[in-house]
Image: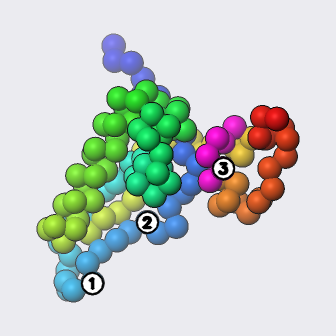
Amino acid sequence: MPRPCKRRRICSMPENYSLAPIDKETPGETLLMSIDEYEAIRLIDLEGLSQEECAESMNVSRTTAQSIYNGARRKLAECLVVGKALRVEGGDYILCEESSCKCGSCRKKRGSSDISPAQSGS
């Protein structure tokens, strides 16, 4: 019996769920990127975290974070090079709670800018 998939923790839902080339009438095939793949791209490429830090934030192993990230990069590359549309949806994830977030991103997204001593670990 296979081991059940561990739910990945994400701190930020996408603001935009689709991307398509503007110079094509019909973009053709649409690639699906899961929410956890989106989160890996956000953490590593946008926030500048290492794969190890990304794995810790998502509550997965480093090799799992690397696999998620590599899959997301392949999809982004195909969209850019071939001109396919991209849709972000689905995946096995949980939205992290502000009190357990280490990156602070969910606090930024949810509008609370100050961190209480209980949240900061002080």
* Secondary element type, mark 2: loop
Question: For this rendering, which residue is in front, 41 or 6?
Answer: 41
Q: Please, which residue is most extreme toward the top here?
A: 1
- 112 relative to 48 in the view: left or right: right
21 part of magenta stretch: no
Residue 35 position, x and y percent, is 44, 51
Check the picture and name the quadrant holding the N terminus.
Answer: top left
Residue 87 position, x and y percent, is 35, 63
**Residue type, mark 3 in image:** Gly
Q: Are marks 3 and 1 in contact (CB under 8 Å)?
A: no
Q: What number is the disc on residue 17?
A: 2
How far apart in space, not on screen, are marks 2 and 1 (Cα)? 16 Å
Q: Is residue 82 above or below residue 40?
A: below
Question: For this rendering, which residue is in front, 105 or 49?
Answer: 49
Instruction: Look at the image and give the residue range highlighted in magenta.
Output: 100-105
How far apart in space, not on screen, are marks 2 and 3 (Cα)? 22 Å
Q: What number is the disc on residue 104?
A: 3
Work out whether residue 99 can be spotted: yes
Tell me what residue is drawn at x 23 percent, y 65 percent.
79
For the stretch drawn in magenta, what is the main secondary structure?
A: loop
User: Mark 3, residues whose alpha carbon is within 10 Å: few (<14), some, or many (≥20)?
Assistant: some
**Residue type, mark 1 in image:** Ile
Tell me what residue is drawn at x 23 percent, y 52 percent.
74
Q: What number is the disc on residue 113?
A: none
Mark 1 highlights which residue? 22
Check the picture and name the quadrant holding the C terminus.
Answer: top right
**Residue type, mark 2 in image:** Tyr
Reading the chain from its start, which is encountered first: label 2 or label 1? 2
